[in-house]
Image (spheres, helix red, strand yellow):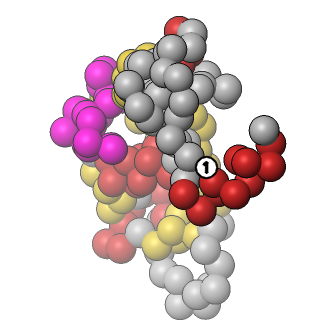
Amino acid sequence: MLLDLKKIFSQESESCSFHYNMDLSSTELNGSFPFISPVAVQGTVEGRDGSAILKAKVLFDFSIPCDRCAEQIDRHYHFTFSHILVRSLVNQENDDRLIEVRDEKLDLDELMREDILLELPTKFLCKEDCKGLCPVCGKNLNEGPCGCENHPVDPRMEVLKNLLH
C-alpha cells in the first residue's frame, strides 16, 4: 500500500488512517513459508510540525517447524509499531528513529514487512525447554527417552569420560 502524505506534510490534513490486508505468504524463513494468513494492518498517521507520527498494529497467524525438534508451531502474533516520518534527513542524519519519505509517498507494505521480520524471534521453539531430537536415532526427546544405549562421545572428551566412571 502506498500512502500519499502530501496533505499531512503540508498540514492540509491533521491525520489519516489505514486498514488493509497484506500478503506475506511468499516470504520464506528457515526454508518454510510461515505466514498462513494475510497480515491485517491498521493504523494512523498524524502530522506534527512538518513531520508525521505513524502508529500501526499488525495481526497474523504463523506456522513454522521448531528449530530443535521439527514439530509444527502455530502462533498468532500481534505487534505494534511507531515511526517518525520526515521529508528529509539532511539535518538529522545520525537519528535512526526517523524514516525519510521521498516524494511524500510511503511504501507501507515494505515498512511493515521489515518491522514484522525484525520483531520475530531468531529461533523458533515449540517450548522454551524443548529437548530436540536424538542425534543417533532421531526420536523426539520431548516424547520421552529414545532407548539409545550410549550417545557417541567426542573423542577429545574420552579422557574426561574415564574420570567419571
Q: Which residue is mark 1?
A: 82
Residue sitting at x 58%, y 70%: 98
Residue sitting at x 63%, y 68%: 97
Q: Secondary structure at mark 1?
A: strand
Position in image of residue 87 (x %, y %): 47, 74
Looking at the picture, tell me which residue is in the foreground, 160 or 14. Answer: 160
Image quarter in which the C terminus is found:
top right
79 sits left or right of 88 in the view: right
- The dominant secondary structure in magenta is loop
Q: Amino acid at mark 1?
A: Ser
Image quarter in which the N terminus is found:
top left
Question: Which residues, given as a range, are shown in magenta?
Answer: 22-44
Residue sitting at x 48%, y 81%: 88
Residue sitting at x 37%, y 67%: 104
Visible residue check, residue 32: yes
Residue 23 sits inside the magenta stretch: yes
Position in image of residue 133 (x %, y %): 46, 27
Dividing the picture into quadrants, the one containing residue 127 is top right
As drawn, 153 above or below 65: below
Q: Residues within 10 Å of mark 1 (few under 14, many from 20)?
A: some
Looking at the picture, tell me which residue is in the foreground, 150 or 55. Answer: 150
Residue 60 sits inside the magenta stretch: no
Q: Residue furthest right?
A: 164
Visible residue check, residue 14: no
